Image (tube, rainbow, N blue to C red):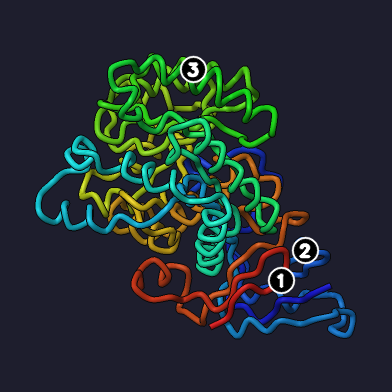
Amino acid sequence: MKLFKNTAGIYGILENNNSPLRGKEINEFKAIANGYVVTDQGKITEYGKLEELKRAESEFEEIIDCQGGLLLPAYCDSHTHLVFATSREEEFVDRINGLTYEEIALRGGGILNSAEKLANLSEDQLFEDAKQRLNKLIKLGTGAIEIKSGYGLSVEAEIKMLRVIKRLKESFNIPIKATFLGAHAFPKTYKTNKQAYIDLIINEMLPIIAQEGLADYIDAFCEENYFTVEQTLQIIEAGKKAGLKAKIHVNQFNALGGVSAFVKEGAVSLDHLEEMNTEDYDALEDSNTIATALPSCSFFLSIPYTPLKEMLSRNIAIALATDFNPGSTPSGNMNFVVSLACIKQKLTPAQAYNAATINGAYAMEVADQVGSITKGKRANFIVTNPVKGLNYLPYSFGENNIHAVYVNGEIVKTN
């Protein structure tokens, strides 16, 4: 057993919970001042006020002095594109010079650029690069993550990406979910016959994915110049037959009517949602589908931010994720995501942390393992430097206030 003591507070305490927080529930990031946590075999077994600890310190194999820092659940990042070939900083300069994301894509940049580069890399090299990135994200406080394919856009390359994600699952001791995003863009050779590429996804990619157990979810980029609502529904249905639930990119630049259709299909989450209309809000209200916002994408592309306050007022379950990818969000830092949600989307720190932890866990169906300080869950948590309180963390957005990260009760990083 291990004892974590001398915290200024334990945050994110949650018991007897079986659904994402919404409405008034999301307003409180429950805390115990001067709290302690006991872990055993990588799981949380006990917590409370230190003065109420009934065990003698001699009973513990290890005592960790948190030195007056806060202890809070590790982040649950439910939307990333962690496996990719290389960065795309040349497009960053293009945007500085006035080109939009769509204009860059139409002239061969964007997703197709990443796919071309990835095709030339071996599975081993992709794995080593992704492993380094994931190690960095864990050190920034991420304790569970979803990773998509989508930079392959061919049978061989998409399967290669998913095999890399499977290897990451086997190599890391945090929950990792894999999402098949073959419908990320249409390859150049299919621009005049888009149905042929959809048939390739359904008839050639999905059978291999199902046979090898390579994915948990299926995704598509439902957007103008990418996949229509009808095409996305076709992909969702094929995914269901292969045992994959839907997590869909939608409403990033345009509201095309997909939200209500995908909620009806039982999508676990709908992600982006920067552009919303009345029908979209009505479809998500009181539904089981989680609305996942990606504020650092809005920051990087200078596009609108997902209207989270309006969603909260309509009893919509919200989550926060990074969208880490080389083109539109070259950052997997969930600390910055929480700060942006407070600064740009006007969430309170408590609301933002709930969206980034327990609701993120629900958005990838791992809330039984992580996302809160709960007896029986994995001891995946962050210990901060001594700070004035929870509100200071998103306020000081340029400062790294993480003292240590623990995964299954084992230390990952200290300053």
Instruction: Looking at the image, tell me whether mark 1 or mark 3 is earlier in sequence order.
Output: 3
Pointer 1: what residue?
410
Q: Residue at x 63, y 72 (%)?
A: 412
Q: Earlier in the sequence, mark 2 or mark 3?
A: 2
Q: How many marks?
A: 3
Seen at 44% across and 50% down, the residue is 84
Residue 157 higher or lower than 51, as above or below: above
Q: Are marks 1 and 3 in contact (CB under 8 Å)?
A: no
- Image quadrant holding the N terminus, namely bottom right
Q: Residues within 10 Å of mark 1 (few under 14, many from 20)?
A: some
What amino acid type should be assigned to the residue bearing mark 2?
Gly
How packed mark 2 is, by other alpha carbons closer than 10 Å (few <14, some 14-19, many 20 or more), is: some
Asked if the residue at tag 1 contacts the one at tag 2, i.e. Cβ–Cβ closer than 8 Å, the answer is: yes
Q: Nearer the viewer, residue 225 or 245?
A: 225
Residue pointed to by mark 3: 264
Q: Amino acid at mark 3?
A: Lys
- Residue found at the very far right of the displayed protein: 59
Residue 374 in view, yes or no: yes
Residue 209 coordinates in the image, percent (x, y): 62, 30
Which residue is labeled 2 in the image? Answer: 42
183 displayed left or right of 240: left
Work out whether residue 9 can be spotted. no
Q: Amino acid at mark 1?
A: Glu
- The earlier-in-sequence mark between 2 and 1 is 2
Cα separation between marks 2 and 1: 7 Å
Residue 347: x and y in percent read 37, 52
Q: Residue at x 24, y 49 (%)?
A: 301
In percent of width and height, residue 83 lies at 49, 50
